[in-house]
Image (tube, grey):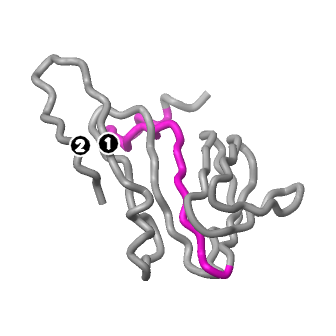
Amino acid sequence: MTAEDHGSPDPAGAAPLPRVLCDTAGLSASGDVPAGALWKLAEPGRQLDANVVRIPPAGRVGTHTEPDLDVLLLVLDGEATLICSDGPRPLRAGILTWLPHGSARGILAGDDGATYLTVHRRRPGMRIQPPGAAAGLRP
């Protein structure tokens, strides 16, 4: 879902302009919201990745470790529990959480589910390289 920003495409060579990308309140306002990614930042040339994700009631994101990227997580709607190595932390709409790289984390949605925004540095794209190229990257 996108929000109309009344902007026009940037002329060639012009500086990029700020613009409205999404109305997050409108994403979960439609009642029966599907689980999964409701929105993704897909602008060309971006330095960030961002997603709005919906977890259904009592659904979960299994515990995992992100070795390379810090992640900001902002709960937009509902309640959840952040599962951390030092114990669970309650999350509700409005709570902004930093998930540092290397930390183990999981999310358990509450009785009404949870919708949240994540933002992190963009991962470089996958590249096809000739056979043996990876050997040159090893220490």
Image location (x, y in percent) of residue 23: 37, 54
Q: Is residue 78 left or right of residue 33?
A: right
For label 2, the SS is loop
In the image shown, does 116 or 134 lie closer to the viewer? Answer: 116
Mark pair 2, 1: CA separation: 5 Å
Residue drawn at (69%, 47%), measured in percent from left and top? 97
* The N terminus sits in image quarter: bottom left
Per the rendering, the mark at residue 20 is 1
Image location (x, y in percent) of residue 72: 61, 44
Q: Is residue 55 left or right of residue 101?
A: left
Marks counted in the figure total 2
Residue numbers of the magenta segment:
111-135
For label 1, the SS is loop
Q: Which residue is mark 2?
A: 5
Q: Is residue 87 left or right of residue 24?
A: right
Image location (x, y in percent) of residue 102: 72, 44
Say which quarter of the image contains residue 98: top right
